Image (spheres, rainbow, N blue to C red):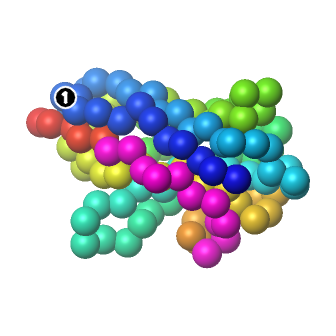
């Protein structure tokens, strides 16, 4: 499975962006999917996760209330709507497919990763 992340860009604080992650095909299992982000010199950190059916979501405290994760399985695509962006949100955002039906904050629980899309938020 190949994941293609897109939608990043340069925005100002308070603006919105929507990231997309499209899979080349459906996985053989009904896997959860997640977004992570990383800045140079730091560990990749969990942002949000969504179950296969989209009925269970979870967010990092730092984005709760501002970001919304969703998915359209008919299009093999996951989204991350990011509102009220802050300079601290600046990072490369990665999408990933979990090995399991549930999401996790551990990168080792994910077997497919997208190439990343850069989000830069200026103050």
Q: Quadrant of residue 112?
A: bottom right
Dot 1 crowding, Cα within 10 Å, few <14, some 14–19, many 20+: some
Q: Of helix, strand and loop, which one carries label 1? A: strand
In this rendering, position of residue 120 left or right of residue 33: left
Residue 48 appears anywhere in the view: no
In this rendering, position of residue 40 left or right of residue 117: left
The percent coordinates of residue 69 (x first, y second) are: 59, 37
Q: Nearer the viewer, residue 122 or 116?
A: 116
Residue 115 magenta:
yes
Q: Residue furthest left?
A: 123
The percent coordinates of residue 52 (x first, y second) are: 80, 44
Q: Quadrant of residue 108?
A: bottom right
Q: Is residue 16 above or below residue 4?
A: above
The residue depicted at 45 percent of the width and 36 percent of the height is 6
State which region is magenta: 108-118
Q: Is residue 27 above or below residue 8?
A: below
Q: Is residue 60 above or below residue 111?
A: above
- Report how many numbered discs are placed on residues in the image: 1
Residue 22 magenta:
no
Q: Residue furthest top?
A: 15
The percent coordinates of residue 115 (x first, y second) are: 46, 53
The residue depicted at 77 percent of the width and 58 percent of the height is 102
The residue depicted at 23 percent of the width and 29 percent of the height is 11
Residue 64 appears anywhere in the view: yes
Pointer 1 residue:
12
Q: Quadrant of residue 107?
A: bottom right
């Amino acid at each position: 499975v190949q994941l293609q992340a897109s939608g990043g860009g340069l925005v100002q604080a308070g603006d919105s962006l929507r990231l997309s992650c499209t899979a080349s095909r459906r996985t053989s299992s009904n896997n959860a999917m997640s977004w992570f982000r990383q800045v140079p010199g730091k560990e990749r950190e969990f942002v949000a996760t969504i179950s296969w059916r989209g009925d269970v979501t979870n967010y990092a405290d730092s984005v709760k209330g501002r970001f919304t994760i969703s998915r359209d399985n008919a299009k093999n695509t996951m989204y991350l709507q990011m509102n009220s962006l802050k300079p601290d949100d600046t990072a490369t955002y990665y999408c990933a497919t979990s090995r399991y039906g549930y999401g996790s904050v551990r990168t080792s629980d994910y077997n497919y990763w997208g190439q990343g899309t850069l989000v830069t938020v200026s103050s």
